[in-house]
Image (spheres, grey):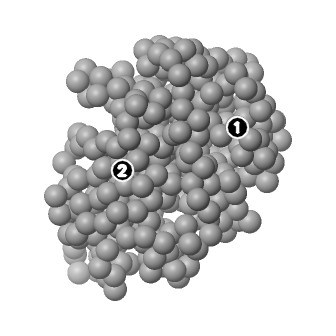
């Protein structure tokens, strides 16, 4: 399926902040206010959704799956809303993939931002419609927290990058490193970005909304994870290997995994994320670039799913090669 690029934003367009996963609890209002200010600084108007305004919760989620889906579908069908930014991640989105109005996405494709649990929305919508989803920061711990503590130069650079990608001012752009990126296997490749939070990717691949095998052909597979047992990550990478994903991809880009502890081995040594990645991919020669600035450490570089990108693991560079919007 060819990528479906969302319509570019214009200055003054309305961006909706919605509670598509975790709740916008009242004690997090300072994050919401900071996120609104950041989006306004990019030149957009901001609207808060009903679930964000209410601050309600249902268990650990903002609402039951049907209500969360109704909020998303309402925004997808609202012509005044030109982009959607989730309030936060969490553990909710897989439950309503079967309730999304995919036809609304096709009629009026608009940018959906977010990472973590929002990965399931990005990948399911991409598999059904081809929509380019912006794996990028959302309101709470992104625009409303990690951006507020980032050095002024970094914050200014990211603000310009997000704004210019959303408004279609950039046909291509290098993604600027903050942390020291690492070459885990040298080489270079060009392909379409596909990925996100590893755990949610596995959920989607086990659902009726799995990515078609050809989606992975030559892809730049990017992933991160948080709070996981190292062995679980190893097993899930093997699931992708058995699905043929590693046979097809052109490169792998690893973000900044968080709270994934090294494991003690019987010989007294330690194994970490790099060790298991090289172990699982030992029969392949695709380049691997790691430590790239996306994940639960933030601020996140935007990684638009379905957009053509070039990765040079040897030179530790990653570049978007086309606009994610049209």
Q: Is residue 179 above or below residue 299?
A: below
Residue 260 appears in the rendering: no
Taking depth in this image into account, of 214 and 58 the one nearest to the observer is 214
**Few, some or many residues within 10 Å of mark 1 (<14, 14–19, 20+):** some
x and y, in percent, of residue 215 in the image? 55, 67
What residue is drawn where x is 73% and y is 26%? 79
Which label sits on residue 108?
1
Instruction: Tell me if 222 is positioned left or right of 287 in this view.
Output: right
Residue 172 appears in the rendering: yes
What residue is drawn where x is 40% and y is 63%? 191
**Few, some or many residues within 10 Å of mark 2 (<14, 14–19, 20+):** some
Classify mark 2: helix, strand or loop.
Answer: loop
What residue is drawn where x is 50% and y is 17%? 11
Instruction: Tell me if 156 is positioned left or right of 198 in this view.
Output: left
Q: What is the CA distance from the residue labelled 1 to the residue labelled 2?
A: 24 Å
Taking depth in this image into account, of 296 and 98 the one nearest to the observer is 98
x and y, in percent, of residue 100 in the image? 77, 46
x and y, in percent, of residue 5 in the image? 56, 45
Q: Quadrant of residue 157?
A: top left
Q: Please report whichever mark, 1 or 2, sits nearer to the chain's N-terminal start.
A: 1
Q: Is residue 6 above or below residue 159?
A: below
Q: Quadrant of residue 38?
A: top left
Classify mark 1: helix, strand or loop.
Answer: loop
x and y, in percent, of residue 220 in the image? 40, 62
Q: Label 2: which residue?
A: 321
What residue is drawn where x is 24% and y is 43%? 177
Asked if labels 2 and 1 touch by Cβ distance under 8 angstroms, the answer is no
């Amino acid at each position: 399926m060819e990528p479906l690029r969302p319509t570019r934003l214009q200055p003054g367009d309305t961006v909706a902040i919605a509670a598509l996963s975790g709740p916008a609890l009242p004690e997090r209002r300072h994050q919401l206010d900071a996120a609104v200010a950041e989006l306004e600084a990019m030149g957009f108007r901001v609207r808060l959704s009903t679930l964000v305004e209410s601050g309600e919760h249902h268990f650990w989620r903002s609402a039951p799956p049907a209500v969360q889906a109704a909020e998303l579908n309402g925004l997808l069908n609202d012509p005044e809303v030109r982009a959607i930014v989730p309030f936060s991640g969490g553990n909710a989105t897989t439950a309503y993939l079967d309730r999304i109005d995919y036809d609304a996405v096709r009629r009026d494709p608009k940018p959906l931002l977010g990472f973590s649990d929002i990965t399931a929305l990005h990948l399911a919508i991409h598999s059904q419609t081809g929509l380019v989803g912006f794996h990028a920061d959302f309101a709470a711990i992104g625009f409303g927290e990690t951006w507020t503590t980032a050095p002024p130069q970094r914050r200014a650079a990211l603000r310009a990058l997000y704004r210019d990608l959303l408004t279609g001012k950039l046909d291509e752009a290098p993604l600027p490193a903050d942390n020291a990126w690492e070459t885990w296997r040298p080489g270079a490749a060009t392909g379409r970005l596909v990925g996100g939070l590893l755990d949610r990717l596995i959920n989607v691949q086990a659902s009726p909304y799995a990515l078609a095998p050809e989606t992975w052909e030559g892809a730049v597979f990017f992933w991160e994870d948080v709070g996981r047992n190292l062995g679980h990550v190893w097993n899930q990478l093997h699931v992708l290997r058995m699905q043929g994903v590693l046979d097809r991809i052109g490169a792998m880009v690893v973000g900044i995994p968080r709270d994934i502890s090294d494991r003690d081995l019987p010989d007294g040594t330690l194994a970490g994320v790099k060790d298991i990645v090289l172990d699982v991919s030992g029969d392949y020669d695709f380049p691997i670039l790691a430590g790239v600035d996306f994940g639960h450490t933030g601020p996140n570089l935007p990684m638009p799913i379905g957009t053509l990108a070039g990765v040079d693991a040897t030179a530790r560079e990653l570049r978007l090669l086309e606009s994610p919007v049209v």
